[in-house]
Image (tube, helix red, strand yellow):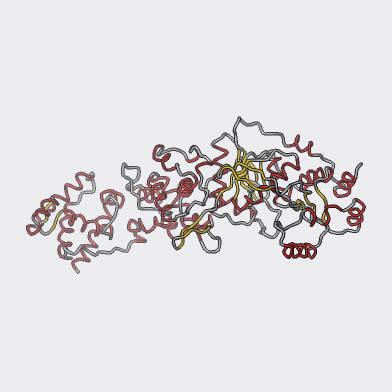
């Protein structure tokens, strides 16, 4: 036994497994050539940021479009950031948006897949096996420096004006302790961290090929980064190398704040004897402000939280559709060519991603959402509206619950047609848009266009009430309105009216406006014939009578 082996045995007396055992426990995945294995790896903060949904969606798309796999891993090594059961909130967030992982964490205390555990705090044994090997090979060592000593080191480096600050080379006091010194300290119970013994050289550069940004050249890492903290828990860096290797990840998709750490990460993969992964560094989701761009902020922007979109009632399809327009610049062309294509069939590519950060624009999202909802049939709109209302508008839900079939007929007006209505962007707008169809919500506004008096309206309505036949189809219905015009001094022909306005009291548009206002209490509505069919003869007659009474008052 040499000193390194003696040190490894002293530091990890209970570790009996070897890295080779782990290689066998987590064999390479049996996937087709070119299949990408990706993961989304949040900390359990309970909060799903729109940027997180964005990255997770990219990870799923990269895997799906290549016949690979994407899993969810929880990175809970930073106890400070963790909140109690921060996992469920994240999983709920993904579920609400229809993002499904192939394996990994599925709940507070559950997971599926052959490459777990998928929660880092349950992987201590794995990290310790790898750490032990590094110590045996002289590539890692215990560091006993205290907080105060590290602060003093930093101050000395400041004063000396060193290029690189940190624990490295000459400055690394514990790097060259003898085994006897190490053993004495460990036996005395002195706390220590485990550090990488860097073999990097600051004057040497290496390049890596970022999937989104292309070639990036950086100097090698030279610092002796911490691998295990005093409590034996790994740092992000060390866990990243161990987990992404043994979970057989091919492409690490993560925020671009990690680019600066790539030299260390590559050094760690090499020291461990692992083949480095490929990286795709995603720029943050941005927001326009005062003509400039800034990151969406959890504190300042309600739309930074994925829950905002659920509460507002954006359909998940619309949010994903919109995110795809931000993810790949050619998505909108693809959508035009494939109006009914499933989102996950889109041929995603890293190369078409923004390097500077996509701008998140709520107005644009609303437009996308209106289009997405316009493509849904009445059945789907009803189901989503009721799901949303049940949670966020119980009063409206209670009204709807009285007659589900009626609600379906209301929400089917002007849908599934060649030119479907596009007036709704979020489920929370449905109530206002259809309130006139529910007696419980109906508060008519009988205001008339300027050229019509209440007496005119009453006269038109009395004539219409006498002529109205609930059995009319749309053509017959309109013919009947036209037929009312001339006897009352209006013309059924708008062009004629424009040519000679003095000759008439108004035109057919005025007559139908009066009927529309009387039946719906609004000037603008979707197809009036469809509305009257849904309301039914009884309600239509009652509303005509109410309006006549109002105008005659
Ligand atoms: N847990 C890391 C974070 O939340 C994930 C980075 C990664 O995907 O590797 O930033």
> 279 or 345: nearer the eye?
279
Q: Where in the figure is residue 419, as x and y percent of width and height?
A: 31, 44
Horizontal relation, residue 463 to residue 329: left or right: left
Taking the image as shown, residue 229 lies to the left or right of residue 504, namely right
Which x, y percent locates residue 321? 46, 46
In this view, the residue in front, 449 or 394, is: 449
- How many numbered marks appear? 0
Q: Is residue 370 left or right of residue 483?
A: right
On screen, residue 198 above or below 28? below
Left or right relative to 33: residue 97: left
Q: Which residue is farthest bottom?
A: 553
Query: What is the quadrant of residue 45 in the picture?
Result: bottom right
Tell me residue 547's x, y (percent).
23, 62
Camera-side residue of 365 and 422: 365
Quadrant where the N terminus is found in the figure: top right
Against 244, residue 234 (above or below) is below
Q: Quadrant of the C terminus?
A: bottom left
- In this rendered view, identify the residue nearer to me: 483 or 270: 270
Residue 195 spot, x, y in % from top left: 78, 52
């Amino acid at each position: 036994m040499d000193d390194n082996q003696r040190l490894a045995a002293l530091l990890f007396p209970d570790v009996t497994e070897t890295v080779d055992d782990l290689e066998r426990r987590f064999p390479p995945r049996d996937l087709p050539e070119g299949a990408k294995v990706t993961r989304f790896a949040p900390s359990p903060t309970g909060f799903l940021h729109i940027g997180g949904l964005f990255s997770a969606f990219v990870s799923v798309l990269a895997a799906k479009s290549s016949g690979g796999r994407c899993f969810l891993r929880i990175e809970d090594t930073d106890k400070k950031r963790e909140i109690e059961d921060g996992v469920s909130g994240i999983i709920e967030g993904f579920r609400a948006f229809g993002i499904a992982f192939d394996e990994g964490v599925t709940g507070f205390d559950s997971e599926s897949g052959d490459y777990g555990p998928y929660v880092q705090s349950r992987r201590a044994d794995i990290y310790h096996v790898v750490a032990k090997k590094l110590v045996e090979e002289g590539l890692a060592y215990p560091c006993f420096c205290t907080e105060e000593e590290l602060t003093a080191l930093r101050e000395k480096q400041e004063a000396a004006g060193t290029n690189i600050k940190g624990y490295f080379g000459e400055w690394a006091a514990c790097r060259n302790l003898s085994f006897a010194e190490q053993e004495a300290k460990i036996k005395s119970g002195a706390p220590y961290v485990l550090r990488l013994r860097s073999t990097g050289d600051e004057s040497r550069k290496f390049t890596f090929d970022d999937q989104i940004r292309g070639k990036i050249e950086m100097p090698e890492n030279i610092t002796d980064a911490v691998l295990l903290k005093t409590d034996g828990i790994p740092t992000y860096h060390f866990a990243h190398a161990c987990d992404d290797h043994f979970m057989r990840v091919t492409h690490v998709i993560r925020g671009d704040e990690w680019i600066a750490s790539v030299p260390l990460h590559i050094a760690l993969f090499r020291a461990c004897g692992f083949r480095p992964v490929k990286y795709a560094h995603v720029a943050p989701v941005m927001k326009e402000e005062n003509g400039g761009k800034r990151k969406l902020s959890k504190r300042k922007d309600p739309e930074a939280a994925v829950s905002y979109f659920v509460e507002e009632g954006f359909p998940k399809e619309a949010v994903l559709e919109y995110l795809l327009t931000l993810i790949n610049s050619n998505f909108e062309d693809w959508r035009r060519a494939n109006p009914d294509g499933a989102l996950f069939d889109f041929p995603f590519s890293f190369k078409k991603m923004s390097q500077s950060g996509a701008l998140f624009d709520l107005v644009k999202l609303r437009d996308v959402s209106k289009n997405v909802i316009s493509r849904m049939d009445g059945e789907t709109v009803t189901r989503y509206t009721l799901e949303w209302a049940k949670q966020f508008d119980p009063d409206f839900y209670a009204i709807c619950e009285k007659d589900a079939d009626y609600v379906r007929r209301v929400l089917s007006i002007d849908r599934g047609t060649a030119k479907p209505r596009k007036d709704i962007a979020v489920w929370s707008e449905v109530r206002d848009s259809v309130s006139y169809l529910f007696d419980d919500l109906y508060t008519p506004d009988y205001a008339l266009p300027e050229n019509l008096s209440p007496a005119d309206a009453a006269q038109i309505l009395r004539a219409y009430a006498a002529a109205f036949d609930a059995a009319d189809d749309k053509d017959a219905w309109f013919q009947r309105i036209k037929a009312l015009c001339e006897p009352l001094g209006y013309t059924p022909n708008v062009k004629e009216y424009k040519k000679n306005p003095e000759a008439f009291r108004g035109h057919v548009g005025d007559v139908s406006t009066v009927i529309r206002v009387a039946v719906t209490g609004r000037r603008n509505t979707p197809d009036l014939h469809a509305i009257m069919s849904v309301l039914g003869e009884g309600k239509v007659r009652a509303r005509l009578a109410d309006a006549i009474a109002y105008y005659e008052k």
